[in-house]
Each structure stands twice: as C-alpha cells, then as structure tokens.
Image: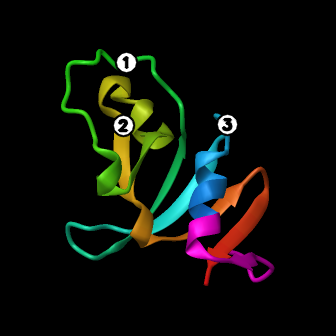
C-alpha cells in the first residue's frame, strides 16, 4: 500500500471492508492455506451466479466472501473467494488506503 495509508485496527479495517457497499476494493491478506500474501480486487454483495446449492459459510469461520474481479473476466461463475478476517492487513476502499495495526 502507499506510504500515506491510514493506520487502524484490524477489526475496524474488516468493518470498513464489510461496509464497502458494493464498491470495488483492493484487499491484501495472508492466505490460510500456504501463508503467502495475496492481493485481490473485488466487490462484496455480488449475487449474480449464486444458486444457493453450495455449503453455507458459518459466521464462526470469520471469512469474508468477495467477488474477484480479475477471475470474473474469464470465469465469472467461479470468481467468489473467501478471505480470512485475521489475515487482512491492508485495503484500499473508495480511494483511501488503510493498514491494520
């Protein structure tokens, strides 16, 4: 992220991501599977290809479902990603950069 990023707590950053209301955002996080950092451009609240037949995600898992705009170009049906709340360390929302402290 940029040098002028606002520093906020991880909880507040996750709240801002969840409240982004369909805006295109960039989220940087650490993947649970291999511990590597990842950057994702996407939107929350997209429901176009959701059929309701998949396994529901319990709230206790602390995952954020986001529609990956890069994958959506080629495979829009499979562009949904779940990112771990505890792995989020930076985001850019409505032109403002945030870093978790």
Residue 73 x %, y %: 44, 31
Q: What stretch is highlighted in magenta?
A: 1-12
Name the residue at 26% across, 68% down.
Answer: 32
Nearest the camera: 49 or 70? 49
Q: Is residue 10 magenta?
A: yes
- Nearer-N-terminus badge (3/2): 3
Q: Distance between the residues labelled 2 and 1?
A: 9 Å
Comparing 14 with 41, the one in front is: 14
Q: Where is residue 58 in the image (x, y as percent from the top left)?
A: 28, 44
Query: Is residue 17 depicted above or below 90 in this figure?
Result: above
CB under 8 Å between discs 2 and 1: yes
How dense is the environment of label 1, judged by Cα within 10 Å: few (below 14), some, or many (20 and up)? few
Q: Nearer the viewer, residue 73 or 27?
A: 27
The answer to whether 82 appears left or right of 33 in the picture is right
Residue 63 in the magenta stretch? The answer is: no
Task: Mark yes or no: residue 38 visible.
Answer: no
Between marks 1 and 3, how big is the CA–CA gap? 18 Å
Sequence-wise, the earlier of marks 2 and 1 is 1
Q: Is residue 96 left or right of residue 17?
A: right
Residue 96 seen in the figure: yes
Instruction: Return the residue at label 1.
Output: 49
Nearest to N terminus: mark 1 or mark 3: 3
* Scheme of colours in the image: rainbow
Badge 2: residue crowd in 10 Å (few <14, some 14–19, many ≥20): many
Looking at the image, residue 73 lies above or below residue 10 = above
Rendering coords of residue 1 (x, y %): 65, 74
| Residue depicted at 41% across the width and 70% down the height | 86
Q: Image quadrant for the C terminus?
A: bottom right
Disc 2 marks which residue? 80
Q: Name the residue under label 3.
A: 21
């Amino acid at each position: 992220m940029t040098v002028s990023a606002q520093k906020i707590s991880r909880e507040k950053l996750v709240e801002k991501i969840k409240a982004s209301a369909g805006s295109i955002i960039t989220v940087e996080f650490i993947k649970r599977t291999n511990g590597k950092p990842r950057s994702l451009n996407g939107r929350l609240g997209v429901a176009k290809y959701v059929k309701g037949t998949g396994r529901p995600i319990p709230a206790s898992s602390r995952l954020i479902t986001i529609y990956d705009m890069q994958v959506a170009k080629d495979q829009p049906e499979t562009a949904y990603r779940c990112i771990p709340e505890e792995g989020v360390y930076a985001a850019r929302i409505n032109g403002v950069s945030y870093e978790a402290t």
